[in-house]
Image: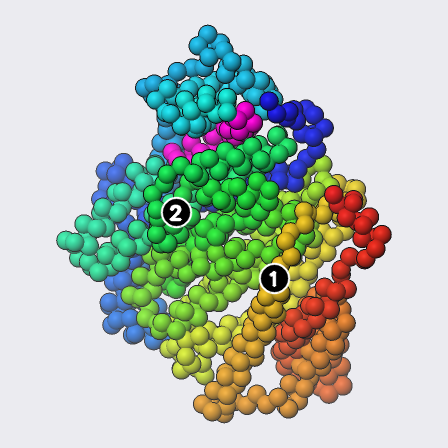
Amino acid sequence: MATMAAPGSPAEAARSRTFLLPSATLSAFVLLIVAVLAFSVVMQPSYYHVFTGGSGDATGDPVDGCVRQGVARAGGPRATMELWARGERLPGVAECARTAFDPAHSQSFLITCGLLAVFTGLHYRFRSTRRARRRGVRPVTQENLPDLHTDLLRLAALAVPGQPVRFLIDLLDPAANGVAFGRVGRRYVLLGRGVLRLRDRDPEAFEALVLHELAHVRNRDIDLTMITLGFFRAYALLVFTPVALGRVAYAAFGPHSGIYAASSAQLLGLALLLVVARAQVLRTREYQADARVVRWQGDPAPLGRLLAEVARRPHGRAGRLRAWGRRLTGTHPGGPNRAAALTDPAPLLAPAFGFAVVLGACLMLLWEPSSSPTARWSYGSVWDQWRPEPLTVLLMVVLGLTVLRAALRWERPRLHALRWGLAVGVVVGMALSPMTIANGLTMPTSFGVETGNVLLRAALLVSLVLWCEYLAAAWAPAVVAARRPLVVALLPCAMVVAVVLVVARPVLELHAIFILSQYDGSATSELPGPLLVFAVTETTALASYFDDVWWLLGAALLLFGPPALGRLGRPGGRRAAPVAPAPVAPVPSRAVPARRRAGWFAGALAYLGLWWVLAGYLDVRWGVSLSPLSDGMLVAGVPAATATVVAVFAPHPVRWAVVTSVSVGLCCGVLFVLLWGMPAFVMRQFVVFGVQGAVLAAFVVSAVTAPRRRRRARRPAGPAAADVSARAT
């Protein structure tokens, strides 16, 4: 038998960074709960009327009826938009206002949450031990299987000391399988009959199989699994099924069949998205258990042999599309992925693409009912009662812990799956939101404007992930050195929450301004869709936020202050130790830095190109000249040029470019106001242009000087490098 490190031994006592923070299973579980609550708000099952005997539409109305009737009285969608552009209100606004305090919607949501909790609790209580009562299942005792019973008790004493675990064997299962199940106080491990042959043939692989199931007990993910399955089934039975059947019936036989047909398609998409969320919970628990087994045994080879044997079992061949769907919705990761994770726990620490898609979609679905154009202009509709901020806090804590967990492994995490997954999640969330149908019926807009709005939100979420990676890299050493890592880790998570809550509503409510800008007859009303979105976003940001110097300084402090605070490294009053070097990864391809530099160049050129097209359009259509040789542009160029020069020689180009451009811009603004008497608001605008130009130039400088900075940061050759390598080992 293999010798394992006992839980009380020094090897077990040495904390692994894999287990410093709450597991990815818990993060995925919280994401699933938020997804179910968000979907319940979107669907609106009318349980209030069911229990009180009142009249109501149990299917929920995908478009606010009050707004729809008001649009009809105003003369149609286009007449409504012109009416709103003039600052007038919908006819019948008093009738809409009376529905604002209808308790049916909020009470139905609370009743739905209560029913989900009760059903999930009953499922956990009565279904968690059902496997123990199946035909052919027998307990492993000293009388019937003495040798196996002795080995199992020894492994349980090493893996889960003090926790009673009952071992069962399925005499009808000829394979070497295992499954852990149960509830608090009643833990079971069910083994297939094939473990008897495995124990004689490969004792270490037998230990790995049993330890894997005991790891589920040790990680406490059995409860999360049972609650996840119960919650998913409760949602399917109590929320999805009645609402879906009702809307399908309305689509087939009722009025507004087209609306309900589109809504039924959205419900199907929501169901698929929830299946992906459930799969993330069940898949991450397997990686976590495998990591625990390798930590106990000290060798990944036994579990690797067991996974290889499972992979050799006959499976049906799957096509490319089916295999891709299985990767998103499968409850167990693929054998090759699990085998690779035994030596490199990247899948355990880096978020999966499906996880990121669900996270981005949930964020959109949470905010659309209260920030969409229909919600803003419905004057007291149901959507005004929904406040997405509490659940947004949970989502952002999940995001912060996810990025920070990756930063404990990699010094500078680059989570491409998280970035692209969030961007795709924005598209999915907007497509599945009922407000998309409502906006299309009441506020017609072009496809280009909707595309530009989605691209803007996706770009901002990707930027948020980039900032989170920067923040996590700064706080990771403090988390490693802390006595209570979770407490310290919650500090950067709170900063992520603060940033998102500050900017979420202003950014998401820009959608209404985009639509109104098509009808207000302004200089931007005839722009193509994406260019209109860019122009409105820039002008709104300049006019409402960035022209205020204090707001600009506050934004810079909020973005760069938290990472600087993490680098001070004094959580709990003691100096934080640096993160231990991670295992050396394979040398990446040269194409990766080249693609990164190309991405910086493409982003900078796209931004400049949009401004050039916008300036040309304004000059031709309205005679508004933005000549680069004008006095204002020259004033804006002073901080931009100074910051660019500083960025060339600075170790962190973007950071120093922002600090330099803001400082030089403020000094230039004060001088020009005092010496030449220029209006202060004009100078503020050009200072903001200078800061934007400096940041843009810093991106280009960062891409160009990346090879030089990497050469400067290489480890020293000779004895010093050998000493560093030895200490890392």
Give the quadrant of the N terminus.
top right
Residue 680 in sight: no
Residue appearing at x 38%, y 33% in the figure:
230
Give the residue number, with chain letter if any, for mark 1.
589
Question: Which residue is at the far top?
Answer: 143
Give the residue number, with chain letter if any, for mark 2.
326
Residue appearing at x 50%, y 45% in the figure:
337
Q: Position of residue 548 (x, y in %)?
A: 63, 71
Report crowding for label 2: few under 14, some 14 to 19, many 20 or more residues within 10 A (C-alpha).
Answer: some
Which quarter of the picture shows residue 452?
bottom left
Magenta region's main secondary structure?
A: helix
Question: In the figure, 627 relative to 22: above or below?
Answer: below
Q: Position of residue 466 (x, y in %)?
A: 59, 59
The amino acid type of the residue labelled 2 equals Arg
Question: In the figure, 362 relative to 427: above or below?
Answer: above
Cβ atoms at labels 2 and 1 below 8 Å apart: no
Residue appearing at x 72%, y 28% in the figure:
10
The amino acid type of the residue labelled 1 equals Ser
What's drawn in magenta, residue-wise? 202-230
Question: In the figure, 277 relative to 64: above or below?
Answer: above
Front-most of residues 414 and 549: 414
Colour setting: rainbow
Cα distance in 3D space between marks 2 and 1: 29 Å
Q: Position of residue 416 (x, y in %)?
A: 54, 57
Residue 217 forms part of the magenta stretch: yes
Residue 401 falls left or right of residue 181: right
Residue 411 in sight: yes
Front-most of residues 146 and 137: 146
Give the quadrant of the C terminus.
top right
